[in-house]
Amino acid sequence: MATDAFPAHGAGPGEALAGDNYLTHDHGILSWLMTLDHKRIGVMYLIGILSSFLLGGIMAMLIRAELFTPDQMFLTENKYNEFFTVHGAVMIFLFIIPGIPGALGNFVLPLMLGAKDVAFPRMNLFSWYLWMTGAFFFLAALVVGGLDTGWTFYTPYSTQTSYVVVAAMMGVFILGFSSIFTGLNFIVTINTMRPPGMTWFRMPLFVWSLYATAIIQILATPVLGITVLLLTAELVFGIGIFDPNLGGDPILFQHFFWFYSHPAVYIMILPAMGIISELMSVFSRKPIFGYRFIAYSSIAIALLGFLVWGHHMFVSGQSALASFIFSALTFSVSIPSGIKVFNWLATMYKGSIRLQTPMCYALSFLLLFGIGGLTGLFLGALATDVHLHDTYFVVAHFHYVMMGGTLIAFLGGLHYWWPKMFGRMYNEAWGRLGCLITFVGFNATFLPQFLLGSRGMPRRYARYEIEFQGLHQLSTVGAMILGAGLLLVGLVLLHSLFAGKRAPSNPWGSGSLEWQATSPPSPHNFEDTPTAGNPYDYSQMHYDPRIEGYVPNKTVDS
C-alpha cells in the first residue's frame, strides 16, 4: 500500500512527479526559447546535438554504401568529397565537441554542485543561440553544395575552391564563441558555486573533467577563430597568408589548425573520461580508486595536449628534430590516460559490479578506447606513421578514439542521467541489447579499416583497387549493424518518455548531489542548498524495493 513517504508511482521519498518541475513549469515554445534554466538549455542542446548526429550518421551510411564496390554506385567523385567533408565537419563541430559539455554538462553540473544554476545563465542561453547560428551556416553550406575540402579545410585547396567555404568558416567561428562562453561559464561556476563541504577533492570527477575541458576551450579556441578569419580574408580579399601563389605558406595553416585541433581532441574525450569515472564507481559499488590521480591526470592531459600538435605533420617537411620532439611528447601524453584506465580497472576489482545499461557502455568504452589509444602509438612513432599517414588506419584510429570513446561515453552518460533528466526509466533489457548491437557493429565497421590502412588503402578515395573490396564490404555491413544498434538505442529512450516507469530520485544509488534532487528536478533544483560529502561513499544508502531506488539509511523505516 502506498504511503505519503513512498508514493505508489515509484517516486522517491516526499517526491511528487506530477508536481512542478523544469519540464512542466512554463508551457509553450517561447518559454523554452527564452529560458535561463540550465536544465532546459541542456535539453535544447541535446535535441540539436542529436539532430546533428543523425545528419552526420546518414552521411556516413551513404559513404559506406558507396564504398561497397570499387565502381561508382550513386555518388560521383565530387559528391563523395562533399559527403565526407560534411560528415566530418558536422560530427566534429556540431556533435562531438559540444556534445557532452553542452548537453550533459549543462544539465548536471549545477546539480552536482548543489547550485540552482550556472554562474551566468544569460551567457549560457546566448551560447546555445550561438551554437544554433553556427549550425545554420553549416546547413547552408550543405544545401548550397560544393564544400569538398575535408573537415580540416587544408590550404591551398580551400583557398582556391568554392566560396561556400566562407559559410563553413563563419559557422566554425561562431561555434568557437559558443565553446568559449560555455567553458568560461563552467570555470566560474565550479570556482564560486560549490556547496558547503565540497572542497576541490570532494568534487565528482565529472566536474573535474569539465573544468579541465573548459581550460582548453578558453585557451585553444581563439587560435581556431583567428585561423578561420585569416582563411576567409584570403578567400575574399586575396591576401597572401596561406596560398603559395600569393606568397603565403600552406604549412602555416596546418600549424595553426592543429594547435587548436589536437587540444580539441581532449575537449572531446576529457568529459567522456569524467563520465566513465562516475559509471565505474557507481556500478561497482566502490569508491573510485586513485581519486587524486584521476583528477590531476585530467589537468595534465589538458596541459600536455597543447604540446603535441606536430605529430599530425610528420610528412609535412618539418625538421627531423621537431618531429622527434613531437613524437616523444606524443608518447608522454598517453601516461595520464593510462593512469585513468588502470584506476578504472582497479575500481572494478572485487567490486559488486552491476551490468546495467550505463555500465555496459562503460565496459565498451574501456575496450574501444583502449584499442584507439594503443593504435595511436603507431601513428606517434616516426617510422610507422610515414607508412600509415593518410590511410584507413588513421580513419579507424580516429573513430576508435572519438566514437569508441566520446560517443560511447556520451551514450553511457545519457542512459545514466536519463531518469534524472526526464523522470522516466527505460527498459533495461532493450537498453543492454542496443549497447551490444552498437558494440558489435562498431568493431565490424572499423577493425577491417586497420587492415585496409596497413595494406596501403588511402583514405578519402571514392574508388579503390579490387583487392580491397572484401574488407570494404565487411566494413559497410558493420556500419549497417552499427546504424541498427544506434536506431534501437534511440527508440528505447524515446519509448521510455511515453511508457517508461516513473523514476525514483536515486535509481542507481549514486552519492553525488544531483541524485538528491527530484526526478525530474524542480525549476530551482533544490529547496535548500545541500551539504556535500564524499560523492563516492555508498555506505549511507541502500536499495528499497518499494520505490525501486536508493534512499539514505535514516529515511528507511525499520
Image (cartoon, rainbow, N blue to C red):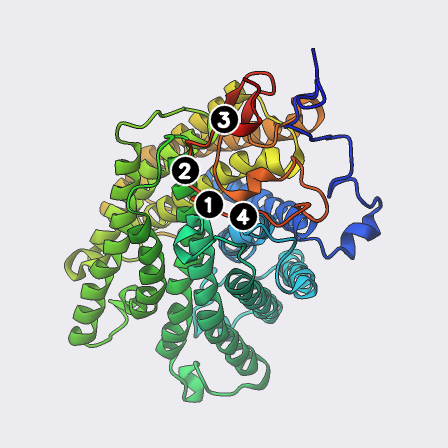
- In which quadrant of the rendered view does residue 267 lie? bottom left
- Numbered circle sitting on residue 434: 3
Q: Amino acid at mark 2?
A: Asp
x and y, in percent, of residue 168 in the image:
58, 66
Q: Is residue 260 left or right of residue 183?
A: left
Along the line of sight, the residue nearer the viewer: 47 or 520: 520
Task: Determine the CA span between mark 4 and mark 3.
Answer: 37 Å
Residue 320, above or below 81: below
Residue labelled with disc 2: 537
Query: Mark 2 and mark 4 in contact (Cβ < 8 Å)?
Result: no
Say which residue appears at 27% left-offset and 37% top-offset: 345
x and y, in percent, of residue 484 in the image:
52, 28
Query: Mark 3 and mark 2 in contact (Cβ < 8 Å)?
Result: no
Query: Mark 3 and mark 4 in contact (Cβ < 8 Å)?
Result: no
Residue labelled with disc 4: 531
Query: Mark 2 and mark 1 in contact (Cβ < 8 Å)?
Result: yes
Q: Is residue 523 left or right of residue 367?
A: right
SS label for mark 2: loop
Along the line of sight, the residue nearer the viewer: 100 or 234: 100
Say which residue appears at 61% left-offset and 30% top-offset: 493
Q: Quadrant of the C terminus?
A: top right
Say which residue appears at 60% left-offset and 71% top-offset: 166
Q: Earlier in the sequence, mark 4 or mark 3?
A: 3
Quick one: label 2, few (<14), some, or many (20+) residues within 10 Å?
Answer: some
Task: Determine the CA span between mark 2 and mark 3.
Answer: 30 Å
Along the line of sight, the residue nearer the viewer: 212 or 457: 212
Q: Amino acid at mark 1?
A: Gly
Q: Amino acid at mark 4?
A: Thr
x and y, in percent, of residue 45 in the image:
63, 51
Residue labelled with disc 1: 533
Q: Quadrant of the N terminus?
A: top right
